[in-house]
Image (tube, grey):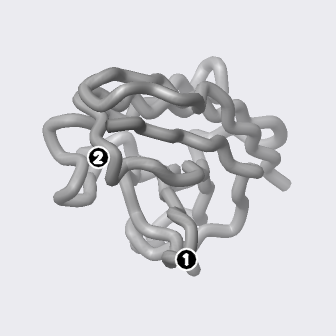
């Protein structure tokens, strides 16, 4: 059983940066695909970034490419999302998820474990 806890959200002006953290307890994240998703009010949870368990190339949603960078530290069992050049459309609750290997990275229904989320608000 993986337990995930996100932190690092907050209020930031457009053009600013935030770094989200996801701390995991339980099994090592080495054996899981890890993903970041977000959900704005009245909208479905959408894919932001996904990291395969193999450590190969991270994938990103088109809307965040070039602005967001996902990473993980296996030794610390931590996952990160560096968000730069934030825009108001990035406002949402951000979730960290863990999925079994060999599952698609970009579908929330393939993730087995979720954190409670952290609010990111970008003002214009």
Q: Tag 1's secondary structure?
A: loop
Give the label on residue 80, or none.
Answer: none
Q: Position of residue 3 (x, y in %)?
A: 81, 46
Cα separation between marks 1 and 2: 28 Å
Classify residue 4 as left or right of residue 91.
right
Q: Which quadrant: the N terminus?
A: bottom right
Which residue lies at the image location 39% right of the left edge and 69% below the top edge?
106
Q: Tag 2's secondary structure?
A: loop
Q: Which quadrant: the C terminus?
A: top left
Q: Nearer the viewer, residue 54 or 119?
A: 119
**Disc 2: which residue:** 58
| Quarter of the figure with residue 98 | bottom right
Which residue lies at the image location 56% right of the left edge and 68% below the top edge?
41
Decide: few, some or many residues near mark 1? Use Cα within 10 Å; few <14, some 14-19, many ≥20.
Answer: few
Give the label on residue 42, or none.
Answer: 1
Q: Position of residue 25 (x, y in %)?
A: 81, 36
As drawn, the residue found furthest toward the front would be: 124
């Amino acid at each position: 059983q993986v337990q995930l806890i996100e932190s690092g959200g907050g209020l930031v002006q457009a053009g600013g940066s935030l770094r989200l953290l996801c701390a995991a307890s339980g099994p090592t994240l080495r054996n899981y695909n890890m993903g970041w998703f977000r959900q704005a009010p009245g909208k479905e949870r959408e894919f932001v970034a996904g990291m395969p368990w193999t450590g190969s190339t991270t994938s990103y949603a088109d809307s965040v490419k070039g602005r967001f960078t996902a990473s993980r530290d296996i030794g610390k069992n931590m996952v990160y999302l560096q968000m730069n050049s934030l825009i108001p459309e990035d406002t949402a609750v951000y979730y960290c998820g863990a999925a079994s290997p060999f599952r698609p990275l970009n579908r929330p229904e393939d993730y087995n474990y979720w954190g409670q989320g952290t609010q990111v608000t970008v003002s214009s």
